[in-house]
Image: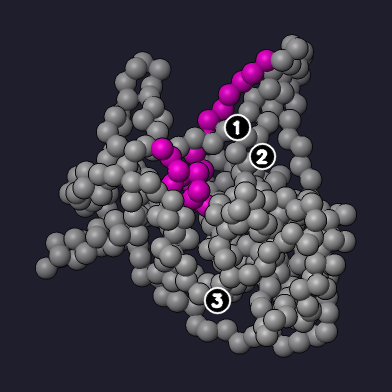
Amino acid sequence: MSAYKLTLDQARAALAKLMEKYTVIAPVMNDNRLDYAEVTDARDVILDDRLPYKSPKETVFPRVENVIRFLEGRVEEAQDIKPILLIGAKPCDIAALNDLDGIFTSDKGKFKDSFYINRRNCLTVVGAGCTSKKTACFCDERGIDMTFSPECDGFLNFVDGDILYEPLTAKGDGLFTGSEAEPPKRDTKPEETLKIEAKEADVFATMPWESYVEGCIGCGTCTYLCPTCHCFNLRDAEDKGIVTRTRVWDSCMYPKFTLHASGHNPRTEKYQRFRQRVLHKYLYIPENYGFTACSGCGRCIRSCPGGLNIRDTVSDIMERLEEAKE
């Protein structure tokens, strides 16, 4: 497929037409903060080097989502899905979406989530590269190229004040057009260096988990901002004789997340909950799915009021494991 060079004004004009067909999600200013949000005016879209505050995972995994209605004598799906065009997704967020694909749709998983699959099939993703690392970002240590991702439907690069669009799939072809141009030359993809290569017994009770989590206040901000966290709860509510089942986000960092109906709670201490979060991403998911569920976006680090740092935690674990081999 050819690449196309166009101005920002041309891109916004094309986007205005696409808004007739899609619900467009893109980086916009929201309460003085850059965020992925639904676009109502193409002129509001901001395509630059900044990383939005939140990830775009709500496009496929909404914070609150009606999934099933229980009617008299029958049950029906309650999803209301429209085609979504996600514009300006950074490579770390594209990698995270692919992680969610592996978790919710992979043959390696125990179940396939039809509600997630329905939304994913209606999503078109156009990425945009970063030109510099942000505070707390460590995507390079996770093996992610911040300038490009081939794992989307099209990609935007910024060249001398103009935009270069590369369609990568049939879904991405024809979204933006301009004068034909050569795709930019790519650097070698960085090597993945931040990972835990160990058995659970090697790290579960041997690492200083209490020290890692000293500042935690159990707010769950890290899990809500994380592009790969996917814990959820199901709630039923009745209104005028119709019961609707709703899926809502939950967090493994909440004290009552693992509270059993019997009253027993296997993770009463915050270090136990943080240990679960780290090992889930860096040990259990790699064992079950073959990839690590962390894209190195740094959102959990930048926004943690207690100063927790998953990158430093994993790095310290790696160092301790190496020392134990000597």
Q: Is residue 106 visible?
A: no
Looking at the rendered image, the disc whose residue lies closer to the viewer, 2 or 3, is 3
Q: Please give the name of the residue rendered at 36% of the width and 16% of the height, measured from the top-left corner.
A: 262
Q: Please give the name of the residue rendered at 21% of the width and 47% of the height, measured from the top-left corner.
A: 211
Query: Mark 3: which secondary structure?
Result: loop
- Residue nearest the viewer, comparing 64 with 285: 64
Q: Is residue 153 above or below residue 81?
A: below
Query: Mark 1: which secondary structure?
Result: strand
2 and 1 marks in contact (CB < 8 Å) = yes
Direction left: furthest residue: 326
Dot 2 or dot 1: first in sequence order is 2
Query: Mark 2: which secondary structure?
Result: helix
- Give the distance between the C-alpha atoms of the residues marked 2 and 3, in whole angstroms: 35 Å
Residue picked out by circle 1: 247
Does 73 sit left or right of 36 as displayed?
right
Give the x, y percent position of residue 35: 61, 54
For label 1, the crowd category at 10 Å Cα-Cα, with few meaning under 14, some 14 to 19 and many 20 or more, is some
- Give the distance between the C-alpha atoms of the residues marked 1 and 3, in whole angstroms: 37 Å
- Give the distance between the C-alpha atoms of the residues marked 2 and 1, in whole angstroms: 10 Å
Dot 1 or dot 3: first in sequence order is 3
Give the x, y percent position of residue 72: 77, 13
Dot 2 or dot 3: first in sequence order is 2
Residue picked out by circle 2: 115
Report the span colored magenta: 219-238
Give the x, y percent position of residue 194: 35, 65
Residue picked out by circle 3: 131
Say if the magenta span includes residue 306. no
Q: Amino acid at mark 2?
A: Phe
Q: Amino acid at mark 1?
A: Arg
Direction front: furthest residue: 32
Does 196 sit left or right of 288 as displayed?
left
